Amino acid sequence: MAFRTDNPLQTGFALAISTAKQQRINLSEWQIKLTQNISGKDTVNLAQSLTNDIAVLNTVGAIPGMAAYAQSQYNDPAYDIAAGFVAMVSALQACLTWLAANIPSNAVSVSNGLEVGASYPPAQTTALLTLVTAAIATIA
């Protein structure tokens, strides 16, 4: 019998942690961006990042036994990792939902063979800034 070098729970947990850390970095950068005009291309990139990371987190969260495994990694019975995970994914989804509802599908268009992005001032993205800030708060 071969020695197993992969543990789906361990691998999935590590992937969830690294995905959350990277999303916290991305969203922190977005806090700064949202104080200025942003382009339609920027919003498309954020939406793609959120979509991809939410998919990864949902896949990891669906691994049988993941909640118990993740909880055991912290040696803190008072810490409810499942609630924290759900809050984080919900906050990321709220950002994505705002983008889908408030940024038109033509945020990026092609004119004379060049990509042309719409521009969105801070006054138009205040709600997104609030959601981004809330999402960051769910990732410690």
Image (cartoon, helix red, strand yellow):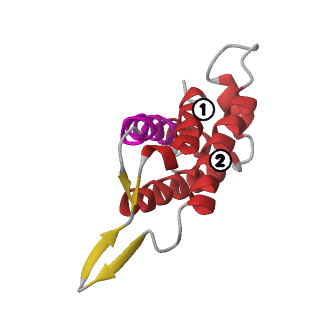
Task: Report the residue marked by disc 1.
Answer: 134
How many badges with numbers are in the image?
2
Q: Earlier in the sequence, mark 2 or mark 1?
A: 2
Q: Position of residue 99 (x, y in %)?
A: 56, 56
Crowdedness of circle 1 by 10 Å Cα count: few (<14), some, many (20+)? some
Disc 1 element? helix
Crowdedness of circle 2 by 10 Å Cα count: few (<14), some, many (20+)? some
Name which residue lies at 62% across and 23% down: 73
Task: Work out whether 14 lies above or below 96.
Answer: above
Q: Amino acid at mark 1?
A: Ala
Disc 2 element? helix
- Looking at the image, which is closer to me, 66 or 130? 130
Task: Work out whether 26 lies above or below 83.
Answer: below
Q: Is residue 3 visible?
A: no
Tell me, for residue 94, which label it has, or none. 2
Query: What secondary structure prevails in the magenta region?
Result: helix
Q: Specify start and end residues of the magenta stretch as a single range.
A: 18-34
Q: Position of residue 119 (x, y in %)?
A: 38, 59
Task: Work out whether 3 lies above or below 105.
Answer: above
Q: Position of residue 125 (x, y in %)?
A: 51, 47
- Looking at the image, which is closer to me, 69 or 86? 86
Quadrant placement of the C terminus? top right
